Image (cartoon, grey):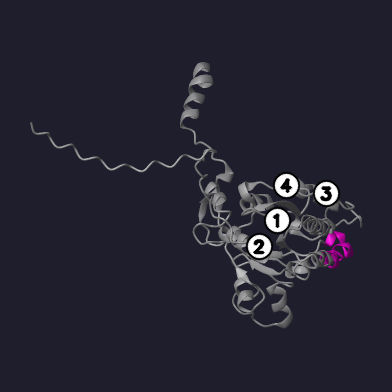
């Protein structure tokens, strides 16, 4: 019996037992509910292949799809005081920061990088909504200032991807002070005559919308992105009226003149390349590389001699 219990039965159970599948193989679309294979979603830049819904994407994944060959150099951002107000609600502010850093693998809510798109050098910065809802704190203000200074130093345009729930309440008035600081940073770009392009993603709300997110030379939004200062629910409760369908969404703002373009994420790279080169006064981007010319010898070849006409055959002599 010991042989059966210890060997035969476990062997049979291992053969017929149900194999467990990893939890991250499938992703459910929040809009249409379709189950999508994770690799299919990743290859489509986190855009649902069934309904076109734009899911959240991290700044690093966005930069890999944006820059040529996915190659970029991260710009160092000055780190501010970790807990200036010693704020605490249900958790201490440093504890919330450590939890967000562990979950996202990032130091803060914004990433700044330099690289090329379509062989055009740029500086780009993107907010990470998964890091404490992309809230604007002192680090985010420092990141935008560092991006603007890098753009001015290298004489490159700045492209910013916004995604935030507003100011970071754990930093109080210090987070609100980032609104005028970032406004001054944008003014540095304008004085240097450098383009500043803003791509508004879902959601862009609060003090971010009231400052650097709406100060660009060109404003582009992803489809159905929520862009506002106060949300629709707050406005409905305040004015006690029903708001129009799609209020404060990207398409609604485009129809009312607050945006220049609404572009799907899968087409965003080509759109940014064309607009950036247009603002810089450059020629259209090269779509592909031409083949290398054939090698030419240094000594020119002599021209071929002209062919001589064939002499007629001599007539046979008569004897």
- Residue 226 visible in rendering: no
* In the foreground, 109 or 96: 109
**Residue 73: numbered disc:** 4
**Circles 1 and 2 in contact, beta carbons < 8 Å:** yes
Q: Nearer the viewer, mark 1 or mark 3?
A: 1
**Whole-Å distance between the Cαs marked 4 and 1?**
11 Å
Residue at the spot 61% in from the left edge and 51% down from the top edge: 65
Q: Position of residue 6 (x, y in %)?
A: 54, 20
The mark nearer the N terminus, 3 or 4, is 4
**Whole-Å distance between the Cαs marked 3 and 4?**
29 Å
The magenta span reads: 169-182
**Relative to 239, 171 lies left or right:** right
Residue of label 1? 122
**Circles 2 and 3 in contact, beta carbons < 8 Å:** no
Q: In the displayed orientation, state which residue is furthest to the right.
A: 85
Residue of label 3? 95
* In the foreground, 187 or 42: 187
Q: Is residue 219 magenta?
A: no
Q: Nearer the viewer, mark 4 or mark 2?
A: 2
Q: What element carries label 4?
A: strand
């Amino acid at each position: 019996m010991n042989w059966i219990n210890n060997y035969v039965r476990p062997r049979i159970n291992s053969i017929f037992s149900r194999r467990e599948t990893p939890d991250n193989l499938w992703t459910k679309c929040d809009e249409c509910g379709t189950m999508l294979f994770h690799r299919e979603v990743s290859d489509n830049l986190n855009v649902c292949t069934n309904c076109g819904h734009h899911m959240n994407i991290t700044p690093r994944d966005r930069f890999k799809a944006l820059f040529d060959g996915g190659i970029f150099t991260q710009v160092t951002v000055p780190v501010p005081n970790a807990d200036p107000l010693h704020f605490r609600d249900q958790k201490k502010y440093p504890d919330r920061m450590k939890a967000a850093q562990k979950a996202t693998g990032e130091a803060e809510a914004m990433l700044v990088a330099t690289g090329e798109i379509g062989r055009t050098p740029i500086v780009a910065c993107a907010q990470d909504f998964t890091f404490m809802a992309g809230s604007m704190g002192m680090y985010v203000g420092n990141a935008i200032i560092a991006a603007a200074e890098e753009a001015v130093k290298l004489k490159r345009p700045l492209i910013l991807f916004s995604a935030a729930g507003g100011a970071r309440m754990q930093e109080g008035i210090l987070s609100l002070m980032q609104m005028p600081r970032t406004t001054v940073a944008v003014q540095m770009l304008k004085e240097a005559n450098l383009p500043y392009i803003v791509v508004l993603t879902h959601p862009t709300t609060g003090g971010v919308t009231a400052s650097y997110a709406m100060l660009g030379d060109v404003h582009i939004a992803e489809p159905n992105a929520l862009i506002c200062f106060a949300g629709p629910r707050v406005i409905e409760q305040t004015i006690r009226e029903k708001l129009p369908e799609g209020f404060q969404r990207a398409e609604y703002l485009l129809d009312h003149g607050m945006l220049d373009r609404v572009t799907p994420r899968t087409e965003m790279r080509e759109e940014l390349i064309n607009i950036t080169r247009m603002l810089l006064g450059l020629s259209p981007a090269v779509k592909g590389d031409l083949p290398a010319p054939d090698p030419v010898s240094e000594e020119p070849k002599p021209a071929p001699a002209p062919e001589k006409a064939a002499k007629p055959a001599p007539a046979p002599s008569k004897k």
